[in-house]
Amino acid sequence: MNTKNSFSRFLSKFYVYILLLLLYAPILVLIIFSFTPSRLIGNWSGFSLSLYGALFKDKEIMQAFANTFLVAVSSAVVSTVIGTFGAIGIFYSKKRTKAIMDAVGNIPVMNAEIVTALSLTILFVFAGIKFNFLTLLIGHVVLTIPFVVLSVRPKLMQMDPNIYEAALDLGATPSKALRKIVIPEIMPGVFSGFILSITLSLDDYIITAFTRNTAFQTLSTYVYGVTSKKGSLPPSLRALTTVITLIALIILIIVNINSSDKKEENKR
Protein backbone atom coordinates (compact mmCIF):
# COMPACT_ATOMS: atom_id res chain seq x y z
CA MET A 1 0.00 0.00 0.00
CA ASN A 2 2.86 2.36 0.92
CA THR A 3 4.63 1.45 -2.32
CA LYS A 4 1.51 2.32 -4.33
CA ASN A 5 1.14 5.69 -2.54
CA SER A 6 4.82 6.46 -3.07
CA PHE A 7 4.53 5.66 -6.77
CA SER A 8 1.42 7.88 -7.05
CA ARG A 9 3.24 10.76 -5.37
CA PHE A 10 6.21 10.24 -7.69
CA LEU A 11 3.95 10.34 -10.76
CA SER A 12 2.21 13.49 -9.47
CA LYS A 13 5.51 15.28 -8.90
CA PHE A 14 6.89 14.06 -12.23
CA TYR A 15 3.79 15.38 -14.03
CA VAL A 16 4.14 18.79 -12.33
CA TYR A 17 7.86 19.00 -13.14
CA ILE A 18 7.22 18.15 -16.80
CA LEU A 19 4.57 20.89 -17.02
CA LEU A 20 6.90 23.42 -15.40
CA LEU A 21 9.68 22.40 -17.79
CA LEU A 22 7.43 22.88 -20.82
CA LEU A 23 6.26 26.27 -19.52
CA TYR A 24 9.60 27.74 -18.53
CA ALA A 25 12.14 26.03 -20.81
CA PRO A 26 11.57 28.46 -23.75
CA ILE A 27 11.96 31.47 -21.41
CA LEU A 28 15.09 29.94 -19.88
CA VAL A 29 16.60 29.41 -23.34
CA LEU A 30 15.97 33.08 -24.25
CA ILE A 31 17.53 34.21 -20.96
CA ILE A 32 20.64 32.05 -21.49
CA PHE A 33 21.16 33.26 -25.05
CA SER A 34 20.66 36.89 -24.01
CA PHE A 35 24.23 36.70 -22.71
CA THR A 36 25.79 35.94 -26.10
CA PRO A 37 25.93 38.24 -29.17
CA SER A 38 24.98 35.49 -31.64
CA ARG A 39 22.07 36.37 -33.92
CA LEU A 40 20.78 32.78 -33.89
CA ILE A 41 19.55 30.98 -30.78
CA GLY A 42 21.57 27.80 -30.43
CA ASN A 43 24.90 29.30 -31.50
CA TRP A 44 26.93 30.30 -28.44
CA SER A 45 29.48 32.98 -29.35
CA GLY A 46 30.89 33.50 -25.88
CA PHE A 47 29.59 35.35 -22.83
CA SER A 48 28.78 38.99 -23.48
CA LEU A 49 26.47 41.77 -22.25
CA SER A 50 26.48 43.47 -25.66
CA LEU A 51 22.79 42.68 -26.29
CA TYR A 52 21.83 44.62 -23.15
CA GLY A 53 23.89 47.56 -24.35
CA ALA A 54 22.19 47.36 -27.75
CA LEU A 55 18.79 47.09 -26.09
CA PHE A 56 19.11 50.30 -24.09
CA LYS A 57 20.54 52.14 -27.11
CA ASP A 58 17.67 51.06 -29.40
CA LYS A 59 15.29 54.03 -29.20
CA GLU A 60 12.50 52.23 -31.05
CA ILE A 61 12.43 49.27 -28.65
CA MET A 62 12.75 51.46 -25.56
CA GLN A 63 9.90 53.69 -26.80
CA ALA A 64 7.71 50.63 -27.41
CA PHE A 65 8.67 49.35 -23.93
CA ALA A 66 7.72 52.68 -22.31
CA ASN A 67 4.44 52.84 -24.28
CA THR A 68 3.55 49.30 -23.23
CA PHE A 69 4.02 50.03 -19.54
CA LEU A 70 2.19 53.35 -19.83
CA VAL A 71 -0.86 51.62 -21.32
CA ALA A 72 -0.64 48.69 -18.88
CA VAL A 73 -0.43 50.81 -15.73
CA SER A 74 -3.01 53.37 -16.90
CA SER A 75 -5.56 50.74 -17.91
CA ALA A 76 -4.88 48.73 -14.73
CA VAL A 77 -5.58 51.75 -12.52
CA VAL A 78 -8.82 52.61 -14.33
CA SER A 79 -10.08 49.02 -14.56
CA THR A 80 -9.18 48.32 -10.91
CA VAL A 81 -11.22 51.31 -9.69
CA ILE A 82 -14.21 50.55 -11.93
CA GLY A 83 -13.99 46.78 -11.42
CA THR A 84 -13.72 47.06 -7.62
CA PHE A 85 -16.75 49.29 -7.25
CA GLY A 86 -18.57 47.18 -9.85
CA ALA A 87 -17.88 44.02 -7.84
CA ILE A 88 -19.11 45.72 -4.64
CA GLY A 89 -22.25 46.94 -6.40
CA ILE A 90 -22.99 43.48 -7.82
CA PHE A 91 -22.32 41.81 -4.45
CA TYR A 92 -24.81 44.03 -2.59
CA SER A 93 -27.46 43.89 -5.34
CA LYS A 94 -30.64 41.87 -5.20
CA LYS A 95 -30.47 38.24 -6.31
CA ARG A 96 -32.05 38.76 -9.72
CA THR A 97 -29.94 41.83 -10.49
CA LYS A 98 -26.83 40.02 -9.27
CA ALA A 99 -27.53 37.02 -11.54
CA ILE A 100 -28.03 39.29 -14.58
CA MET A 101 -24.89 41.31 -13.86
CA ASP A 102 -22.84 38.15 -13.31
CA ALA A 103 -23.98 36.75 -16.66
CA VAL A 104 -23.28 40.03 -18.49
CA GLY A 105 -19.92 40.44 -16.75
CA ASN A 106 -18.76 36.98 -17.77
CA ILE A 107 -19.42 37.57 -21.49
CA PRO A 108 -16.12 39.48 -22.11
CA VAL A 109 -14.20 36.73 -20.31
CA MET A 110 -15.66 33.93 -22.42
CA ASN A 111 -15.90 35.96 -25.62
CA ALA A 112 -13.17 35.73 -28.26
CA GLU A 113 -10.81 38.69 -28.04
CA ILE A 114 -11.07 39.34 -31.78
CA VAL A 115 -14.84 39.89 -31.37
CA THR A 116 -14.24 42.49 -28.64
CA ALA A 117 -11.57 44.20 -30.77
CA LEU A 118 -13.80 44.33 -33.87
CA SER A 119 -16.77 45.59 -31.82
CA LEU A 120 -14.71 48.42 -30.34
CA THR A 121 -13.32 49.32 -33.77
CA ILE A 122 -16.79 49.51 -35.32
CA LEU A 123 -18.03 51.58 -32.35
CA PHE A 124 -15.19 54.09 -32.65
CA VAL A 125 -15.60 54.40 -36.43
CA PHE A 126 -19.39 54.80 -36.09
CA ALA A 127 -18.93 57.48 -33.41
CA GLY A 128 -16.35 59.28 -35.54
CA ILE A 129 -13.62 58.92 -32.91
CA LYS A 130 -10.07 58.98 -34.22
CA PHE A 131 -7.83 56.18 -33.02
CA ASN A 132 -5.47 57.51 -30.38
CA PHE A 133 -4.21 56.74 -26.87
CA LEU A 134 -7.73 57.11 -25.44
CA THR A 135 -9.23 54.48 -27.75
CA LEU A 136 -6.35 52.13 -26.90
CA LEU A 137 -6.88 52.77 -23.19
CA ILE A 138 -10.62 52.07 -23.50
CA GLY A 139 -9.88 48.81 -25.30
CA HIS A 140 -7.54 47.60 -22.55
CA VAL A 141 -9.96 48.68 -19.81
CA VAL A 142 -12.77 46.73 -21.48
CA LEU A 143 -10.45 43.71 -21.65
CA THR A 144 -9.35 43.82 -17.99
CA ILE A 145 -12.38 45.01 -15.98
CA PRO A 146 -14.09 41.56 -15.86
CA PHE A 147 -10.93 40.00 -14.43
CA VAL A 148 -10.78 42.63 -11.67
CA VAL A 149 -14.38 41.82 -10.77
CA LEU A 150 -13.55 38.10 -10.68
CA SER A 151 -10.57 38.82 -8.39
CA VAL A 152 -12.52 41.00 -5.95
CA ARG A 153 -15.72 38.93 -5.68
CA PRO A 154 -14.18 36.02 -3.70
CA LYS A 155 -12.85 38.45 -1.07
CA LEU A 156 -16.30 40.00 -0.73
CA MET A 157 -17.79 36.54 -0.24
CA GLN A 158 -15.17 35.72 2.43
CA MET A 159 -15.86 38.96 4.30
CA ASP A 160 -18.17 38.92 7.31
CA PRO A 161 -21.29 40.75 6.04
CA ASN A 162 -22.18 41.88 9.55
CA ILE A 163 -19.23 44.27 9.90
CA TYR A 164 -20.61 46.62 7.24
CA GLU A 165 -24.03 46.60 8.92
CA ALA A 166 -22.37 47.15 12.29
CA ALA A 167 -20.52 50.19 10.97
CA LEU A 168 -23.80 51.68 9.74
CA ASP A 169 -25.48 50.96 13.10
CA LEU A 170 -22.63 52.75 14.89
CA GLY A 171 -23.27 55.91 12.88
CA ALA A 172 -20.93 55.60 9.90
CA THR A 173 -22.23 56.83 6.56
CA PRO A 174 -22.38 54.25 3.72
CA SER A 175 -19.41 55.89 1.96
CA LYS A 176 -17.33 55.95 5.17
CA ALA A 177 -18.22 52.32 5.97
CA LEU A 178 -17.22 51.39 2.45
CA ARG A 179 -13.92 53.26 2.72
CA LYS A 180 -12.99 52.21 6.26
CA ILE A 181 -14.44 48.67 6.42
CA VAL A 182 -15.12 47.06 3.05
CA ILE A 183 -12.13 48.33 1.01
CA PRO A 184 -9.47 47.24 3.56
CA GLU A 185 -11.09 43.80 3.83
CA ILE A 186 -11.00 43.18 0.09
CA MET A 187 -7.63 44.86 -0.60
CA PRO A 188 -5.81 41.56 -1.41
CA GLY A 189 -8.39 40.89 -4.15
CA VAL A 190 -8.08 44.46 -5.42
CA PHE A 191 -4.29 44.13 -5.60
CA SER A 192 -4.59 40.76 -7.38
CA GLY A 193 -6.95 42.32 -9.91
CA PHE A 194 -4.51 45.19 -10.46
CA ILE A 195 -1.57 42.84 -11.10
CA LEU A 196 -3.72 40.64 -13.37
CA SER A 197 -4.81 43.72 -15.34
CA ILE A 198 -1.20 44.76 -15.91
CA THR A 199 -0.28 41.23 -17.00
CA LEU A 200 -3.18 40.99 -19.47
CA SER A 201 -2.44 44.44 -20.89
CA LEU A 202 1.27 43.73 -21.34
CA ASP A 203 0.47 40.50 -23.15
CA ASP A 204 -2.27 41.84 -25.43
CA TYR A 205 -1.83 42.21 -29.18
CA ILE A 206 -5.26 41.89 -30.84
CA ILE A 207 -7.09 44.72 -29.06
CA THR A 208 -3.96 46.88 -29.22
CA ALA A 209 -3.64 46.36 -32.97
CA PHE A 210 -7.29 47.27 -33.60
CA THR A 211 -7.64 50.28 -31.28
CA ARG A 212 -4.28 52.09 -31.48
CA ASN A 213 -3.00 54.83 -33.72
CA THR A 214 -0.52 53.26 -36.17
CA ALA A 215 2.21 55.63 -34.96
CA PHE A 216 1.88 54.33 -31.40
CA GLN A 217 3.94 51.16 -30.96
CA THR A 218 3.77 48.72 -28.06
CA LEU A 219 6.04 45.73 -27.62
CA SER A 220 3.47 43.32 -29.05
CA THR A 221 2.88 45.37 -32.21
CA TYR A 222 6.61 46.10 -32.56
CA VAL A 223 7.55 42.41 -32.31
CA TYR A 224 4.85 41.44 -34.80
CA GLY A 225 5.94 44.15 -37.25
CA VAL A 226 9.64 43.29 -37.04
CA THR A 227 8.97 39.54 -37.34
CA SER A 228 6.75 40.10 -40.40
CA LYS A 229 9.41 42.19 -42.15
CA LYS A 230 12.61 40.37 -41.19
CA GLY A 231 11.29 36.89 -40.45
CA SER A 232 13.18 36.76 -37.13
CA LEU A 233 13.47 38.66 -33.88
CA PRO A 234 16.27 41.18 -33.26
CA PRO A 235 18.80 39.63 -30.83
CA SER A 236 18.36 42.54 -28.38
CA LEU A 237 14.79 41.36 -27.71
CA ARG A 238 16.29 38.36 -25.92
CA ALA A 239 17.76 40.81 -23.42
CA LEU A 240 14.39 42.55 -23.12
CA THR A 241 12.78 39.19 -22.31
CA THR A 242 15.25 38.73 -19.46
CA VAL A 243 14.58 42.24 -18.09
CA ILE A 244 10.79 41.74 -18.14
CA THR A 245 11.11 38.29 -16.53
CA LEU A 246 13.32 39.75 -13.80
CA ILE A 247 10.81 42.54 -13.09
CA ALA A 248 7.95 40.01 -12.89
CA LEU A 249 10.01 37.79 -10.59
CA ILE A 250 10.80 40.67 -8.23
CA ILE A 251 7.10 41.66 -8.06
CA LEU A 252 6.11 38.04 -7.38
CA ILE A 253 8.68 37.73 -4.56
CA ILE A 254 7.47 40.99 -2.96
CA VAL A 255 3.83 39.86 -3.15
CA ASN A 256 4.66 36.46 -1.62
CA ILE A 257 6.68 38.06 1.20
CA ASN A 258 3.81 40.44 2.01
CA SER A 259 1.32 37.56 1.96
CA SER A 260 3.53 35.49 4.29
CA ASP A 261 3.92 38.43 6.70
CA LYS A 262 0.15 38.99 6.82
CA LYS A 263 -0.46 35.29 7.50
CA GLU A 264 2.05 35.38 10.36
CA GLU A 265 0.36 38.47 11.81
CA ASN A 266 -3.06 36.82 11.61
CA LYS A 267 -1.75 33.73 13.41
CA ARG A 268 -0.45 35.89 16.24
Image: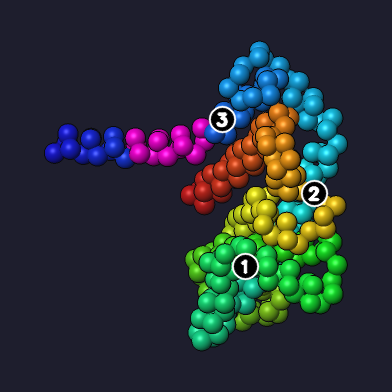
Farthest residue toward the top? 46
Q: Is residue 21 magenta?
A: yes
Asked if residue 75 is positioned above or below residue 21 in the image, the reply reads below
Residue ID at (79%, 38%): 61
The answer to whether the residues at label 1 and label 2 have Cβ atoms under 8 Å apart is no
**Render colour scheme:** rainbow
Q: Which residue is mark 1?
A: 115
Q: Which residue is mark 3?
A: 28
Residue ID at (67%, 34%): 232
Give the quadrant of residue 223.
Answer: top right
Q: Is residue 154 magenta?
A: no
Tell me where residue 103 appears, x and y as whole percent.
52, 77
Tell me where residue 16 appears, x and y as whole percent.
39, 39
Asked if residue 62 is positioned above or below residue 92 in the image, the reply reads above
Q: Judging from the image, what secondary structure is the residue with disc 3 in?
A: helix
Which secondary structure is most common in the magenta stretch?
A: helix
Q: Judging from the image, what secondary structure is the residue with disc 2 in?
A: loop
First to last magenta residue range: 13-25
Q: Is residue 248 visible?
A: yes
Q: Which residue is mark 2?
A: 217
Which comes before the other along the chain, label 2 or label 3?
3
Q: Estimate the spatial distance between the alpha carbons at disc 3 and disc 1, rounded to whole Å.
A: 34 Å
| Residue kind at label 3, given as amino acid type | Leu
Q: Is residue 153 visible?
A: no
Which comes before the other along the chain, label 3 or label 1?
3
* Disc 3 packing (10 Å; few <14; some 14–19; many ≥20): some
Residue ID at (71%, 70%): 120
Q: Estimate the spatial distance between the alpha carbons at disc 2 and disc 3, rounded to whole Å.
A: 26 Å
